[in-house]
Image: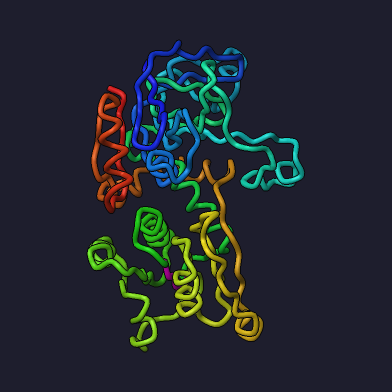
Amino acid sequence: MRIALVTSPGSVEIRETPRPGIGEDDVLVRIAACGLCTMEAKLYTGAMPVYPVAAGHEVSGRVEQVGARAAALEDAPAVGDLVTVDLLTRCGSCRHCRSGNSAICASPQGSLLPDGSISMGAGLAEYVRVPAAHAWPVGDADPLHAAMGEPLACVVHSFRRGSFQPGDRVAVIGGGFMGRLHLLLAQHQQARSVTVIETDEARRTAALAAGADHAVTPEELAELVELPKADVVFVTIASREAIAAGFRAAADGARLVLFGGSHDTPDAVLPGYEVHRRQLTVTGSYSQEPADWRAAAALLRSGALADRLAPLVTSRHELADVDKALTESSGSPVFRVFVEPR
């Protein structure tokens, strides 16, 4: 089969490698689509210098083989099923996994391929092997939408961390891809209103077209007194300024979820007295857990989000043009660029 490896900044190769075999608890998935996120962009630009690396972790595909033990389980993926695929590894044994918090599993992510290359998803390929428990059937969903299962599961996790309830007023800091997923999930789950705070005019316009009640700049938060304060604030950008905007957008008693993150982001100042006096709750949201995948797969299977997900498809590329896809996703404002191993 073909697989793409990022070998150095700006350089990607397509190599031939044996199709993976499966164990009794595994499934073999023929990949239909792989979305490119900021991690792939960082690997390609050199911001995350890990080489040679098989990237790609937002994947959908068709099940081609099912291990004998997995096939005997109720609700297991079957041959022919379209699935959204969880490519994270969880040890199941650390204190976090054992307490139900596998999103913060203590075991490092990644593994080695047979040729010694580093696997960080390895979804830019024709096939992938995963445990059957990590393949979630999505019915007749659009394969591109199904490839958004991983980021959608992350947003489901974010809503759980923020204790969102129908009728809450929501503020989303950032109008990029993850911000838009927060917007559409808030709409689907019956938020009373959604305000998007974004510096880019085009993304503010796009958020309004997608149904946001308000789309404003951080500066307008203080100027527009009629803006509703939010019960839940989702900060999808990793910056001091974004976190500060989140506090300005919050109502007394609000929950602030720090969703966007980067290890090189400067530390933000926590307004301790404000948190104390206004009884604010500040929490983080990282990755996702099996319960989030189950909910995300159900949403995809229902088709309820299809019309809102369609505008987030920026472009589609064949695997042979993976270099063009990586260049586009890392060099210009996009929502999601997809690679389809046709």
- The quadrant of the rendering that contains the N terminus is top left
Q: Residue 315, how many percent across, how many down?
A: 23, 41
Q: In the picture, residue 210 is in which quadrant? A: bottom left
Q: Is residue 189 magenta?
A: no
Residue 301 visible somewhere in the drawing? no
Q: In the picture, residue 242 is in which quadrant? A: bottom left
Boundaries of the magenta span: 168-172
Q: Nearer the viewer, residue 284 or 294?
A: 284
Q: Residue 9, how many percent across, how many down?
A: 39, 37
Q: In the picture, residue 31 is in which quadrant? A: top left
In the image, taking residue 90 as reference, residue 75 lies left or right, namely left
In the image, taking residue 291 as reference, residue 310 lies left or right, namely left
Q: By what rule are the colours in the image chosen? A: rainbow
In the image, taking residue 114 as reference, residue 64 lies left or right, namely left
> Is the stretch drawn in magenta largely helix, strand or loop?
strand
Q: Residue 300, how many percent across, how many down?
A: 39, 42
Q: Nearer the viewer, residue 34 or 100?
A: 34
Q: Nearer the viewer, residue 133 or 221?
A: 221
Q: Is residue 255 above or below residue 12?
A: below
Q: Is residue 126 above or below residue 191?
A: above
Q: Is residue 296 above or below residue 89?
A: below
Q: How many marks?
A: 0
Task: Determine the residue positioned at 56% across, 20% down.
Answer: 26
- The quadrant of the rendering that contains the C terminus is top left
Task: Determine the residue positioned at 34% across, 68% down.
Answer: 198
Residue 317 visible somewhere in the drawing? yes
Q: Residue 147, how many percent across, how many down?
A: 38, 37
Task: Determine the residue positioned at 23% across, 63% down.
Answer: 202
